[in-house]
Amino acid sequence: MSQAKSKIGHIAWTDLTVKFATKIGDFYAAVVGWKITKVDMGGYADYGMNRPTDGKMVAGVCHARGQNADLPPQWLIYLNVASLKTSLARCRKLGGQVICPARKLMGGRMAVIRDPAGAVAALYEPGRD
């Protein structure tokens, strides 16, 4: 997630967390045309999915391991918020659920919520310089 994408309310990132990340990464590379870059996760690699035209990483395919073991196997968008604590409180108050509690991620903090309709999204509070 880049600083250029740290504007509040913007979609910061999209990824997919699954048990068979290598196989699924290869699937999307073949179907969409993405090029794969391995991303070192300390003992294993997740996959950055890069546009074939300019090589820009636009999504990730991740292994369902460690802190990511309980993430749902779906494309997950990360929405930038000003305050993760405030947004999580509002989520609960308005009938949503926090399904993955707040944790550090890429210089900021994130949590995964389920809205009252059942849709899942990640909230991301960018780090402050």
Image (tube, rainbow, N blue to C red):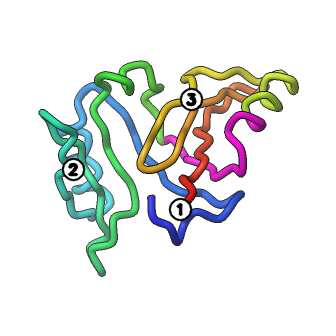
Q: CA distance from mark 2 to mark 1?
A: 24 Å
Q: Measuring 39% from the left and 55% from the top, which residue is drawn there?
A: 59
> Residue 110 versus residue 33: which sits nearer the camera?
110
Depicted 47 relative to depicted 10: above or below: above
Q: Which span is picked out in magenta? A: 76-87
Q: Is residue 82 left or right of residue 93?
A: left
> Farthest residue in the front direction?
129
Three-letter residue code for mark 1: Asp
Q: Are marks 3 and 2 in contact (CB under 8 Å)?
A: no
Q: Are marks 2 and 1 in contact (CB under 8 Å)?
A: no
Please name the residue that numbered disc 3 is placed on: 102
Depicted 44 relative to depicted 39: above or below: above
Please name the residue that numbered disc 2 is placed on: 39
Q: Earlier in the sequence, mark 1 or mark 3?
A: 3
Magenta segment: does it hold 10? Answer: no
Please name the residue that numbered disc 1 is placed on: 129
> Farthest residue in the left direction?
43
